[in-house]
Image (cartoon, coloured by chain):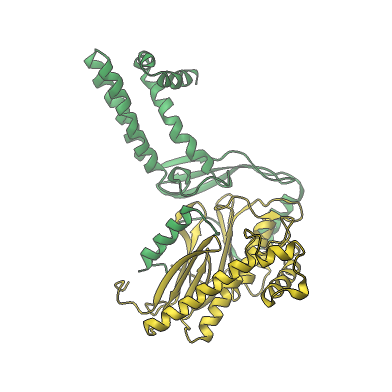
Amino acid sequence: MRRALFAITGLAASTTALVVLKGSPGATQVAQNLPTAQPVNPSGPGVDPSADPAAPAADPTGAAPKPSGTADAPTSPKPTKSSTTRPSGTKTTAKAPTAPKTTTKAPQSTTRRVTGPTVDTAEDYGYVQVQIVVSGNKIIDAVTLSLPSGGESDIHSGDVRNKYNGTGGEVVQKQSANLNTVSGATATSNAYKQSLRAAIEQAF
Amino acid sequence: MPPALTRPGLCRVEQIMGTTITLDLADDLPPARLRELADDVFAWMREVDGRFSTYKPDSEVCRFDRGEVLLSEASADLRFVLEACADLWGATDGFFDAYATGRLDPSGFVKGWAAQVASDRLLAAGAANHCVNAGGDVRVRGFSPTGEPWRIGIRHPWDAMATCMVLAGTDLAVATSGVYERGRHVLDPRRGAPAGGLRSVTVVGSDLGVADAYATAALAMGAAGIGWLDRLTDHTHAVVTDDARQFHSTALPLTV
């Protein structure tokens, strides 16, 4: 962790840091993975409501793995840049494989877990934290790490499970084919327009 | 899918009420008649916006809220909306509350109602096959331009470009309320705090204004909203919880 922080500071400080990075290629990876991990986390279910659902990284079920894969691409120029400033040619080749390693790693790990932050559901309801398991672009499982305890919320959950007549409990999936229109929450954002446009284009 | 240029009818999109209104007329009518029908629909939507916008200080709803317009002086539309909101407040145990924010804001009913009225007028004018989408609230009647029942996707609550369910029908009002676009804007009127537990609520019925209000109310109820929706005899529902679980009525007109 300290190493990672050191690496970040180093990157920011540019040329001076290259010396540090040269010594620890592992730290470089940690530091560069951070930006991809961070946007994914707020996407956990029931997290920051203001999180733009259009942002591909903020999407627990969507193509998040791929954008993170491509986000790794800019990491390769960095080692290259550092290697050009370095006199040693052997280290350039040693560095180059490390960067692509991150790129190849991302598509390989088809199943990954994304943990949302603890979210205050509302006063009196307590906190909820959820972890989802993503395979490809589908959520295959969702685990509740912490649940509100006691009080009204327990009664509510019990009510739902005991008396519900509908079908329920399965993890939400993606489905679409030849739609005429889309029903969704009101939005003024570009995301809505994009979705609407996509639906129209698909329909005609 | 037919080629874009050979389908009958007309499709028009406009930005009104701070959102997107889409009209799809599927009847094979003369182009001039279709344009006339579409003009009427959008003129009505703009009229509603002018009258009910809470963002326009000179709208009737704002003037009424400030006491500048008395109930006896109010337009028939405003009186109808106020009465409907009062009924819905009772029907939802107070969870649909046009005064939840501390001032009069009937938007949770008005958008769906406006689209419902537009659809009713189209039907009366002889355009029995159409789809009106007012910012995600959908009213369909008859058949789509391909001659099949209308196919309505329910937006995936975590992906604006995907849908999580597909409904099909020839006479449906489908309203969806969710926290994914404007944040937790729906308040639990009993606590004055943002509602939690549900990410998206879709209600299907015959009146889009009522469906819209029910969806908003259930979202405000949180997890208890699922049980409340389940007890409605004349509406079906689909709910996605904050932990990405999906619940729906067995009678929901789902298709693949």
Instruction: Say which of B57 and B159 sits in front.
Output: B57
Colour in which the image shows chain B: yellow
**x 48%, y 83%: residue:** B128
Q: Is residue B39 left or right of residue A74?
A: right
In this picture, is B182 found above or below B234?
above
In which quarter of the view is residue A167 placed?
bottom right
Q: Quadrant of the C terminus of chain B?
A: bottom left
Give residue A110's position: percent from left, percent from top: 39, 42
**Quadrant hosting residue A126:** top right
Let me know if residue A202 appears in the view.
yes
| Relative to B34, B250 lies left or right | right
**Residue shown at 68%/65% (left/top)?**
B61
Q: Nearer the viewer, residue B104 or B136?
A: B104
In the image, is residue A4 above or below residue A143?
above
Q: Nearer the viewer, residue A12 or A178?
A: A12
The answer to whether B192 is drawn above or below residue B134 in the figure is above
Task: Single out the residue that lies furthest toward the left.
Answer: A89
**In the foreground, A79 or A161:** A79
Measured as percent of width and height from the top left, residue B137 is found at 54, 67
A25 relative to A49, above or below: above
- Whether residue A181 is visible to the viewer of this picture, yes or no, is no
Please give the letter of the chain rendered in green.
A
Query: How many badges with numbers are in the image?
Result: 0
Occupied quadrant, residue B97: bottom right
Locate residue B215, reporting x and y percent. 62, 63
B252 relative position to B61: left or right: left
Name the quarter where the N terminus of chain B is drawn: bottom left
Give x and y (percent) for residue A46: 58, 47
